């Protein structure tokens, strides 16, 4: 059974701070890792994806992947109140078409 | 910016009735998916579709479910005889093909299905 685990939160950070969101996965065959943002009642919105160990930066967002530890994280710099949402970690295996999602971490950015 | 569109946004149906949820994937995408999210729970994979056939399906996607691409633009999910536990938000998604990999999935706004 493939599992993707996230701390459900809520994670509260002050405006302007760095928010750090973490995700672990159980299947060592996982190859692609995705972060989605989901506002309440809305659909998942892709933020970024990462395939290789290390860091990947896109604007205020940095994804970090450590396959040996089966760990992926998302850092949000200069957090804004509009970043308040649930962040979903999703994992895909090589040759598979499906994403396995975690339950998400609810982030609250306090003005 | 291209987006996945879904209709209707909300569907209420009686238990035992058939429903069809519709989706128009992003036009140059080749992989199509249906996911669902029961209120307060995680997003769950139902089925993927590529080259006019099902590529992969989950245990949730039993004989009550079917998918179809009736023309060059629409992608549909049919539930033959709805149950109360089918009540959920259903998301359609699509992915481009990059090299040999299907990659990031872009989600539509969802159809909220309520079975009464």
Image (cartoon, rainbow, N blue to C red):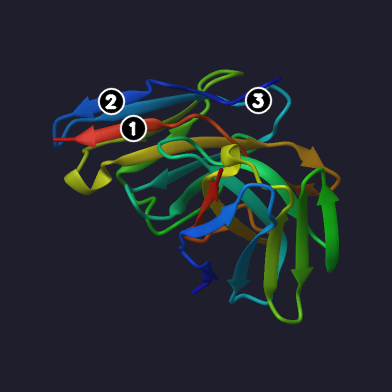
Residue A65's x, y, as percent? 76, 67
- The correct choice, above or below, for B71 with respect to A25 in the image is above
Residue A91: image location, x then y, percent: 63, 60
* Location of mark 2 (residue): B11
Task: Give how far apart the Cα atoms at labels 3 and 2 are.
Answer: 23 Å
Choose the circle earlier in sequence order: 1 or 2: 2
A95 to B20, vertically: above or below: below
For disc 2, the neighbor class at 10 Å (few under 14, some 14 to 19, many from 20) is some
Label 3 Cα crowd, 10 Å radius (few <14 / some 14-19 / many 20+): many
From this view, report whether residue A29 is shown above or below residue B12.
Answer: below
Left or right of residue A68, residue B93 in this image: left
The answer to whether marks 3 and 2 mark residues whose Cβ atoms lie closer than 8 Å is: no
Q: CA distance from mark 1 to mark 2?
A: 6 Å
Q: Which residue is mark 3?
A: B26
Q: Chain of mark 3?
A: B
Secondary structure of the residue carrying tag 3 is: loop
| Callout 1–callout 2 Cβ contact below 8 Å | yes
| A66 to the left or right of B70 | right
């Amino acid at each position: 059974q493939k599992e993707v685990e996230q701390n459900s939160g809520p994670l509260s950070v002050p405006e302007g701070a760095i928010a750090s969101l973490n995700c672990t996965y159980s299947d060592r065959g996982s190859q692609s890792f995705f972060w989605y943002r989901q506002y309440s009642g809305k659909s998942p919105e892709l933020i970024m994806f990462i395939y290789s160990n290390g860091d990947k930066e896109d604007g205020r967002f940095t994804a970090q992947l450590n396959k040996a530890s089966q760990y992926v994280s998302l850092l949000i710099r200069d957090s804004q109140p509009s970043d308040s949402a649930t962040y979903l970690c999703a994992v895909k295996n090589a040759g598979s078409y499906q994403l396995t999602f975690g339950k998400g971490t609810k982030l609250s950015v306090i003005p | 910016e291209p987006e996945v569109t879904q209709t209707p946004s909300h569907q209420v149906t009686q238990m035992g009735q058939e429903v069809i949820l519709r989706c128009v994937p992003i036009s140059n995408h080749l992989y199509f998916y249906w996911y669902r999210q029961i209120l307060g729970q995680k997003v769950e994979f139902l089925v993927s579709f590529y080259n006019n056939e099902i590529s992969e399906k989950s245990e949730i996607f039993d004989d009550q479910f079917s998918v179809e691409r009736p023309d060059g633009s629409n992608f549909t999910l049919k539930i033959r005889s709805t149950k109360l536990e089918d009540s959920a938000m259903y998301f359609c998604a699509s992915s481009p093909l990059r090299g040999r990999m299907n990659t990031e999935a872009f989600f539509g706004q969802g159809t909220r299905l309520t079975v009464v």
